[in-house]
Image (cartoon, rainbow, N blue to C red):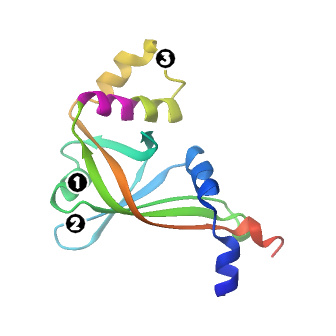
């Protein structure tokens, strides 16, 4: 299995290309009692780093304020031979600057709603009211692409 693991690992370029595709991520934070809080999230990018925004009073935001450790899983595929994914383990760093918060919001909008133009500025600003954003400081990346195995 160790050789197979090496065979299916994505290169850094493949990881970047996969994350640039439009997927829903699963973000995992730690609740106060130590249990895992896992939620589906759309994500964007800020200065090349994966970024997310959420309501300031959400459970995930409260969890990250208390303990910034986070794992984000992005995956695709329906059948075994199609499975691809990237797990990012690290720390969620709060975005404090309003311009950076807006950039995260515009990136998410552009990826999941419609191409961002200045005509969408008001919609993005409205979406960001009472929201906070985080960028991932990735400490470990795990990836797999079962398509590299050929027919199984």
Residue 102 quadrant? top left
User: Taking the image as drawn, is residue 50 in sight?
Assistant: yes
In the rendering, at what x and y percent does residue 64 appear?
Answer: 23, 56
Residue 99 quadrant? top left
| 114 vs 66: above or below | above
Does the magenta run of residues contain 102?
yes
User: Taking the image as drawn, is residue 42 in sight?
Assistant: no
Pair 2/3: label in front: 3
Q: Secondary structure under badge 2?
A: loop
Count of numbered tags: 3
The region drawn magenta spans 98-105
Q: Secondary structure under badge 1?
A: helix
Q: Earlier in the sequence, mark 2 or mark 1?
A: 2
In the rendering, at what x and y percent does residue 80 appear?
Answer: 70, 70
Query: Pointer 2 and pointer 1: residues touching (CB < 8 Å)?
Result: yes
Q: Which of marks 2 and 3 is nearer the N terminus?
A: 2
Give how far apart the Cα atoms at labels 3 and 1 are. 31 Å
Q: Which of marks 3 and 1 is nearer the N terminus?
A: 1
Q: Nearer the viewer, residue 66 or 140?
A: 140
Q: Residue at x 57, y 44 (%)?
A: 20
Q: Residue at x 45, y 30 (%)?
A: 109
Residue 82 quadrant? bottom right
Magenta highlight: main SS: helix
Name the residue that disc number 3 marks. Answer: 117
Name the residue that disc number 1 marks. Answer: 59
Does the magenta run of residues contain 51?
no
In the rendering, at what x and y percent does residue 17 appear?
Answer: 62, 49
Name the residue that disc number 2 marks. Answer: 31
């Amino acid at each position: 299995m160790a050789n197979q693991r090496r065979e299916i690992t994505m290169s850094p370029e493949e990881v970047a290309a996969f994350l640039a595709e439009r997927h829903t991520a699963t973000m995992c934070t730690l609740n106060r009692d130590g249990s895992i809080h896992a939620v589906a999230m759309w994500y964007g990018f800020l200065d090349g780093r994966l970024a997310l925004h959420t309501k300031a009073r959400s459970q995930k935001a409260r969890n990250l304020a208390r303990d910034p450790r986070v794992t984000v899983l992005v995956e695709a595929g329906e059948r075994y031979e199609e499975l691809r994914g990237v797990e990012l383990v690290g720390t969620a760093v709060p975005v404090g600057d309003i311009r950076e918060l807006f950039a995260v919001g515009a990136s998410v909008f552009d990826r999941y709603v419609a191409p961002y133009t200045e005509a969408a500025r008001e919609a993005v600003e409205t979406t960001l009211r009472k929201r906070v954003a985080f960028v991932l400081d990735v400490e470990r990346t795990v990836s797999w692409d079962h398509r590299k195995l050929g027919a199984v």
